Image (spheres, coloured by chain):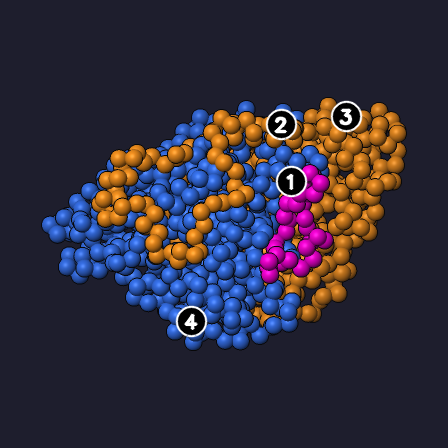
Chain colours: A blue, B orange
Amino acid sequence: MRKPEPLIFELSQPGRGATAQHPPVAQAELPAALRRRSRLPLPEVSELQAVRHYTRLSQMNFGIDTQFYPLGSCTMKYNPRVCNSLAMLPEFLGRHPLAPASTGQGLMSCLFELQEMLRNVTGMAAVSLTPMAGAQGEFAGVAMIRAYHRARGDTARNEIIVPDAAHGTNPATASMCGMKVREIASRPDGDVDLAALEAALSPATAGIMLTNPSTLGVFERNIVEIEKQVHAAGGLLYYDGANLNAILGKVRPGDMGFDVIHMNLHKTFSTPHGGGGPGSGAVGVGPRLAPYMPVPVVAKEDGRYRWLDERDLPQSIGRLSGFMGNAGVLLRAWVYMRVLGAEGMRRVAEYSTLNANYLLARLVEAGFEAAYPGRRASHEFIITLRRQARETGASAMDFAKRLLDHGFHAPTTYFPLLVPECLLIEPTETETREELDAFVEAMAAILREAGTDVATLKGAPYTMPVRRLDDVRAARQLDVAWKPAAA
Amino acid sequence: MPYIPHTAADVRAMLERIGVSAIEDLFDEIPQDLRVDALPGVPEAQSEMEVSRLAAELAAADGRRLNFIGAGAYEHHIPAPVWQLVTRGEIYSAYTPYQAEASQGTLQIMYEYQSMIAALTGMDVSNASLYDGASALAEACLMAVRAHRRSHAARILMPATVNPAWRRASRAITEGQGIEIEELPYDPARGVTDPQALARHAGTDVTALVVPQPNFFGQLEDADAMTRWAHGNGALVIGAVNPVALALIAPPGEWGEGGADIAVGDAQPFGVPLSSGGPYVGFMASRLEHVRQMPGRIAGRTVDADGRTGYTLTLQAREQHIRRGKATSNICTNQGLLMTAATVHLALLGPVGLERVAGACVARTAELVAALTGIDGIRCAFAGPRFHEAVLLLDRPVAPLLEALAAEGIIGGYDLSREYPELGHALLVCATETRTAADVGRYADALGRLLGRAAAA
């Protein structure tokens, strides 16, 4: 276990500073009445101290670059370095977003091409790149569904149907858009219960939010029937793109009849997760929702590119960001798609599915229980540790923590909520067979430990910078900001 | 196969283990008539070398110019260590710190960032960042409605001097929840919120008043008076602030008697390049009493099983993955990478560096305004103190001038004619510490020439 790293504030000494960073230019003052009264309690450290501190902190993290990171539903695949270096070309980085469009034709050509590529891989009619994360893409999608019904005077439609396996963002988004949420059950085989769907549909139905393949790690086999039922009831279909990686180039949401889709470019198109962001949640729409897309959108007219705004799309749900979304993330996705090309898109689905099914087969051989036996895994799958929990007392969380000691990031734990003691495992296409085999060996070793020394297992992890943290204390004795000691 | 490591032998062995004969068999649960075989419209693969050349050519065609626009995104010097550290794989390729023990780096950086934002804004608590300034303001409006239990109106007063894009985003994001956003006009002489317009709302149910500081015109509002008015009328105060300016001017926590209730803004000026519009990093801070209404991730300091200090995500009962339809927001992530850039940037600048940057911004903008208003036919729109932006009034349409300046390598400012048509031919200009006296001279010469007039010496 390594030495704890103090806070940057604890390294501070009055009068010290990274003075090479101080601007050498003239200063001006503001009227006294407007001035700040308190001193600014920022750290005073040398440049080396800052560099060393943040380098050390980085070493306390797992990342894809350092570890297998099979976090289900998060698509933690290799983020090609070239995507970063090209997005950080000085011309792209230095460009002000409000500079005339005539000075940004190169950038806009990339964004336009990205819109077109995403439109084609999803089978939608149009794409807007502006949402800044998956959750904002979801918001845009439900807001468009709402705007569509209202524009038709169909104002009684205020319910969004969400399967119980859905990400928490789905119901949260529906609420943010002023919609009521109706949850429907999944069947024991993982598919949506069609009878429950039929019972939920009504003249109040605005739409349904579906993830396909679902977060249960299986493809929704009744998708054609669901599409017919929902559309017949006057509702629209929303596709949550969290698991698009599994079907890229194989089957398209537009062909399944979805009216709107969000894509997580930070998952399927391999832009970095960055410790929690930035994401990018581009949305694709069918013809019915095209007038309502969030602005701005890049258009190509007579060989020149320009931004379409509220004047071009007067029914738009509006603007969700200060400028045009996360342009730098979009550039990274553009580079990724260009390097992969059409064939590479299909290989993403094929090899992520191959890796998932292989890992599932090997874990089952090693004594683990598949939550949906008899089903093909998509690019991810669920194992349930309910038997181990019952027999040994070791929980899914214990397995997750012990995996850290074996040098693997843990899979997603306790999600989806309807599978007890579950691990949602997504290996992605960029992992080698040897890495998957090593993961199986670690899981098998933990399983043995659960049988022989469960106390040790329950104390894990032991090799991280800290052991298990007191979350209850964190919430009860709230300490979320360092404050200088009172003078 | 780019980024896919499988050998033919791997594939054979893996398929055998699964018990199928081809990868295609793994897709047999997908209805056959939905399947596609080709992706027209997606180009063929190219090597890294080919794509690099293409991108470099497109970037070079856009070129680099001398920038004088602010309007919500500001060009500052970024210390060399910032992006070298941010793009370390352990930071760049990590995810949200769900496994806290394996994410102490990210979590401690979050905690340090929250501490720095709280210090700058003079508030008690900060979250670990939101998408950008515009969406942070929208989230602040929603948060104010949740936090203010005595107000039943869900009504926000929003000065016209707030960034127009932020106002539009606030409308778009809050619209579904029936929140009313009412605009407040500005005083045409000073370019700040008209106190009389505010006074007309006295006695009505106002949930919150937004106070921009500096405002979109670069002018400094009377934040103390606005805060006193709002609190006197039972409304909360949302400060929408430029974080660099806070090194010099009173932060939201010092406004009026008790300070603002919520402070938001965009921390892009801290180590985040202009990058054509994003990704940036919204910040949000508040008084402690409202922390449970805050959206987004929050890191907290706690102890581990051995009593050692450690960091973890906290107050997660507010969030979508626990509360689902009853969460404070649908937001999942923060802007981790940009939050990290802001934290490293502030650690390197420290209090002295940041004050010098802010002071240099004020000085350079004053020089720019003096140089440009020295040209016959250009005058300053508003009197009164300002930070690092100013509105100039011209005697002819601004857009053609900006195109002509761009052709000379100068991005001359932001044309206000669409958002503020009442101002006539108005141009918003900005100069930060990155503009030199020679840069200012070059701009004034070019503009004088285009207007057919020599710049005053």
Identify the residue position indicated by label 2 in the image: B60
Q: Amino acid at mark 1?
A: Pro
- Which of disc 3 and disc 2 is earlier in sequence? 2
Real-space Cα separation, disc 1 to disc 2, in angstroms = 17 Å
**Does the magenta segment cover residue A417?**
no
Give me the chain letter of mark 4.
A
Residue A97 image label: 1
Q: Residues under labels 1 and 3: Cα distance?
A: 24 Å
Q: Residue at x 61, y 30 (%)?
A: B59
Q: Which mark is residue A197?
A: 4
Q: Is residue B333 visible?
A: no
The quarter holding residue A345 reads: top left
Which subunit holds the residue at mark 3?
B
* Residue A357 in sight here: yes
For label 3, count other residues whose C-alpha is less than 10 Å away and answer few (under 14), some (14-19) or many (20+).
some
Q: Amino acid at mark 4?
A: Leu
**Foreground disc of the pair 1, 2:** 2
Is label 4 or label 1 in front? 4
Separation of marks 4 and 1 at Cα, in angstroms: 45 Å
Determine if marks 4 and 3 fall on one subunit: no
Of helix, strand and loop, which one carries label 2?
Answer: helix
- Residue drawn where x is 84% and y is 30% of the image: B450
